[in-house]
Image (tube, rainbow, N blue to C red):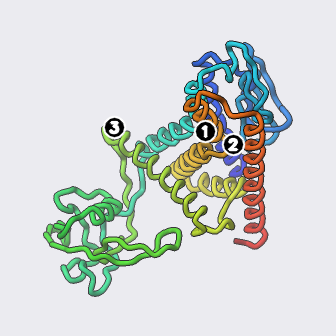
Amino acid sequence: MGTLTSILVLSFLIFFHELGHFLAARFFGVHVEVFSIGFGKKLFTKVVGNTEYCLSLIPLGGYVQMKGQDDRDPTKVSFDSDSYNTKEPWKRIIILFAGPFANFLLAFLLFMAIGSMGVSKYAPIIGKISENSPAFEAGLQENDRIVMINGTLIEGWDEVSTLIQDSMGKLELKVERAGSVQTLLITPKINEYQNMFGETKQKKMIGVSPSGKTIEVNYSADKLLGFAYDQTVKATKLILTSLQKLVEGVVSPKELGGIISIVQVTSEASAAGIVALFALTALISVNLGVLNLLPIPALDGGHIMFNAYELITKRAPSEKVLRGMTTAGWMLLLSLMALSIFNDIYRLTNGN
């Protein structure tokens, strides 16, 4: 059941991405010849209007085949009025960007659904207190509930961390203890910590950790859009930072995961419940959006790069450059796919 759920999730994400390209292409009068979910042998086809819609054998991607545009041979063009390559470069850029944008939009909608169903957060209840820390010296105690920091009402532990980082000077904490509210003044200190990439960083701390108790937060209509936007931005920053750390060598290429990892993690998320599945689907959707915008020929970002060049210089790249860069782009993508699949198999066979 988990594997089936994973395939359905991937197919849905691919469909949404390609739907973005399709709608933008049709808006600008470009004829779409094929709309396919999956690659390889076509298992099911249906012609509606002049477009062939199909499900293909390998559910690892999809494509929208527009008239006058062929990733396998970028020099194949058509000069008909409904052809992709006869449209102005800025229109082509919008068509190309529409796919990744659809992924960001889908993530936003999923986060809205999550916010309305209820988000589990650490309660703002203090657990462990470090000795000789600002919190210890100020008199904070285990099981104190933080209700306000510098006049801001606290709902979850994530707000505690954010307000500490944003603070300038002393913090005024109001804490609930044994049925009464007490006010304490605390000055954070700069301490070292290790981030999720294993790097040693510095940040403001007061020396407390959450108790581990959780609460469920349901966002009202007036806060739902803000929550969804913030979560989409956070997911985008996480993916971009991960890519940066991979390029810098902070994250090993061995950490790359492919389709097997996605299926495995999605299966686990589906077993954990609908909220966990929606959250993971949103993260994968953002990941697809970001990766497709990378300036690699054969990806949307690579095509955007070519069209931006034409928009600025008023002339298209030469056929030789298009062929060479597109071939190099495909080689890079296939190499990354092979590495990720190898890593997946290695992790499975070694029990990691």
Foreground residue, 128 or 180?
128
Point out which mark residue 221 bears. 3
Residue 75 shows in the view: yes
Q: Quadrant of residue 340?
A: bottom right
- Label 3 Cα neighbours within 10 Å, binned few <14 / some 14-19 / many ≥20: few
Give SS at disc 1: helix
- How far separated are the C-alphas under marks 1 and 2? 8 Å
Q: Earlier in the sequence, mark 2 or mark 3?
A: 3
Q: Quadrant of residue 207?
A: bottom left
Q: Amino acid at mark 3?
A: Ala
Q: Which residue is mark 2?
A: 297
- How far separated are the C-alphas under marks 1 and 3? 39 Å
Residue at 22 percent of width and 56 percent of height:
153
Q: Amino acid at mark 1?
A: Met
Q: Position of residue 95 (x, y in %)?
A: 59, 28
Query: How many numbered circles does the render carry?
Result: 3
Q: Are marks 1 and 2 in contact (CB under 8 Å)?
A: yes
Point out which mark residue 305 bears. 1
